[in-house]
Amino acid sequence: MLDFSTAAPLCPPALTRPGHDTEPAGGSAQLALSPYQAGWPARFRVEAEVLRVALSALSPTVEHVGSTAVPSLAARPVIDILVGLPAPLLIDAFAARLSNFGYIVLPPSQDDGVRVVVRRLRGVRTHHVQVVATYGHDWHRILLFRDLLRHDEALARQYTLVKLDLMRQHQGNAVAYASGKASFIRAIVGA
């Protein structure tokens, strides 16, 4: 069990190699945390504009979420983006248009009201987009967790330690890693 009472920095200095988040088709990934990169917000802004253009007919609401949206937090170097639409399934009609911008709309994994869109460059996932109902339950839950991390240094430190532990436990298994993070997030903000 991790001891969260230690005063470890939010971004441990000896993390794995930044920029190496390969994700083969089978779902395995080299799990690597990177120290916070000052360029992540700029990468988000560029892609947010791309998504606004690609989905302009739907008037999307776009937010930077996930660990790359929290200054000083270690993260997998994948820009997490939250897109709010009137209904998440509307994204399917824009799959071809999004592919022109390098995005792939993934098939739904479950009927939970969230659709996922990813962007890869040379086999490396660079962007992970969650599409949810604007101002719905998932929208508020995701933004609440981001904002808690931005304003609560102890929680951000705890989350970093959880991610490091999950990374060690599940190296090469991105699904198990993500499931462990989801359990932590549910414990903080609910389902």
Image (tube, helix red, strand yellow):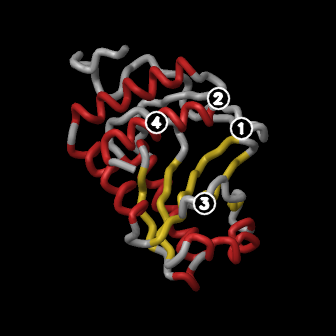
| Residue 176 image-quadrant placement | top right
Asked if the residues shown at circle 2 and circle 1 are in contact, with their CB atoms under 8 angstroms apart, the answer is yes
Of marks 4 and 3, which one's residue comes earlier in the chain?
3
Amino acid carrying label 1: it is Gly
129 sits left or right of 3 in the view: right
Secondary element at image label 4: helix
What residue type is disc 3 on?
Asp
Mark 3 is surrounded, within 10 Å at the Cα level, by few (under 14), some (14 to 19) or many (20 or more) other residues, namely few
Q: CA distance from mark 2 to mark 4?
A: 13 Å
- The answer to the question of whether label 4 and label 1 lie on touching residues, with beta carbons closer than 8 A, is no
Q: The N terminus appears in which quarter of the rendering? A: top left
- Which comes sooner in the sequence, label 2 or label 1? 1
* Amino acid beneath label 4: Lys
Q: Are there few (<14), some (14-19), or many (20+) residues within 10 Å of tag 4?
A: some
Q: Quadrant of residue 105 in the image?
A: bottom right
Q: Position of residue 108 (x, y in %)?
A: 67, 58
| Amino acid under disc 2 | Asn
- Say which of 170 and 35 sits in front: 170
Q: Which mark is residue 113?
A: none
Q: Which mark is residue 27?
A: 1
Q: Secondary structure at mark 3?
A: loop
Name the residue beneath numbered marker 4: 181
**Image-based side of 39 in relation to 115, left or right:** left
User: Looking at this view, is 169 or 12 the one in front?
Assistant: 169
Which badge, 2 or 4, is on the more N-terminal residue? 2
Q: How far apart, in angstroms, are the residues tagged by discs 3 and 1? A: 20 Å
Residue identifier under label 2:
173
The circle drawn on residue 111 is: 3
Q: Are marks 3 and 2 in contact (CB under 8 Å)?
A: no
